[in-house]
Amino acid sequence: MLLSPCGRRTKNYEIRSHSLKKEFSSRIKLCYIDVPFNTSSDSFAYNDRFNHSTWLTFMKNRLEVTKTLMKKDGLIFVHCDKNEDAYLKVLMDEIFDRENYITSISVKSNSISGNKTRFKNKTILKNKDTILVYKGDGEVTINPQYTEKTKWDTHYNAFLEVVDEGKNIYKPRRLKDVLIENSIIDSATTITEDFINNKLFMEFCIKHKSQIYRLVNSIPADIKSKSLESENKVIKYSDTDGNIQYALNGSRIAFLSGAVQEIDGYEKLAQLLGDMWSDIDFQNTQNEGGKGVSFPTGKKPEKLLQRIIDMATKKGDIVLDFFMGSATTQAVAMKLDRQFIGIEQMDYIEDISVKRLNNVINGEKGGISKAVNWDGGRDFIYCELAKWNESAKEKIIKCDNYNELVSLFSKLCEKYFLHYNIKVKEFQEKIIKKDEFINLTLDEQKKMFIQMLDLNQMYIHRTEMEDSKYGIDERDQELTKLFYEGD
């Protein structure tokens, strides 16, 4: 598990997802979960081939815990795909209440090549994921997000020249005339939608965004009559919210400034984003995370998490992700000055997740680093569950053949906790020697061994950590007490 910010790092305390309840109940502003897709093809090493009901139970347990941790004005974004998204929505309707459902975002996550042979024996090829969005039980604020426009709106074809602002005297002009005067275009040029790709043109428009405009019909009747009294007379007025507006020839003046937003650190012509996200590159995330972080097909783009975190939080808020994977959520949260909690059950946490966050602290330049001017810094604390039967499970999985399993059994009986109804002597002297067991595949034999372990003893309980047989040192015992009991 990872927490931020903190100045120490330790291992071996018993911390489970629900152990967070006392300290973090109703404190999480955003939970983002990139769930195992239940396809058997993810690069993450979860059991990614559950039967349907087992997968839903797996998710139900975790979502119920998440509900207790979320603030009333918090949000949860659950990233899934077509294999389970419909069923997951029904489950989330039950846990978070159907009235708290906000939307289902479609995210373009794959490009289809158009090769007809790829369509063989398929129906409709997949190139999107779904993100289910729910809120807590209170009112929430969702910060608007924008995507860069790809076409110039040719209705922005006029320029308001300030003659005497103190006396509200303005001179309407053709935008083209102003551009010619400034040597942006010549008189033979026609401004088209594709002009958005003209660097000089766009730089001029962004610089003069409060003078370039188009006319819109929505305008109060009394202002409309005044603005029609004299041709080309600009009327300045306040709307019902007290905002300054301008009218010309019976129409409201809509300035380009309303369509310009900061994107990736630069002002750009922008479009308000809805529930269809097709502008994020999912195909080239292999280099995100810095040196030594190899997770070529499983990483979500940092840009995706930046958008979600920007939508749902402000600086200092806590972001939770309990399928941490390659730590994309935590890396982006750190770069955006948010606190974070990450939970991961797989062994790659040290080789990938922790390594990536250390790279972030050291100022790695991948992902969104350039857009947010990331230079490094900050810190986190890293904690591990103290394994017990989990270690036995790992030993079973590592066995290469039947003889190694047989040799391991006596050690399991001596050191670890077996299920109460296991008849150890009968299994060791009879069952394990029968042809029926010997002829099982190695995976089936391992599965039977794992089923004999007491699942309630996978990790060391806090109340038993002082028992010398577990080997928990005094420093980790003290840190565990601090976590659960406070000062």
Image (tube, rainbow, N blue to C red):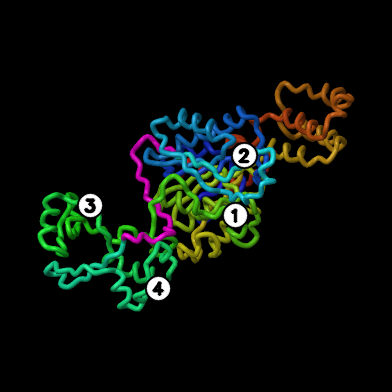
Q: Amino acid at mark 1?
A: Gln
Q: Which residue is mark 4?
A: 200
Please determine whether, in this image, residue 432 is positioned above or below residue 467.
above
Q: Which residue is mark 3?
A: 217
Closer-to-camera residue (274/95): 274
Closer-to-camera residue (385/250): 250
Closer-to-camera residue (270/8): 270
Q: Which mark is residue 74?
A: none
Q: Amino acid at mark 3?
A: Asn
Distance (Cα) linking label 2 and label 4 = 71 Å
Residue at 45%, 57% in the rendered image: 336
| Tag 2 secondary structure | loop
Q: Which residue is mark 2?
A: 466
Q: Residue furthest front?
A: 188
Residue 99 occupies which quadrant of the picture? Answer: top left
Sequence-wise, the earlier of marks 1 and 4 is 4
In the image, is 301 to the left or to the right of 410?
left
Q: Which residue is mark 1?
A: 283
Please determine whether, in this image, residue 60 is positioned above or below residue 313.
above
Sequence-wise, the earlier of marks 1 and 3 is 3
In the image, is 76 to the left or to the right of 219?
right
Between label 2 and label 3, give the one nearer the viewer.
Answer: 3
| Tag 1 secondary structure | loop
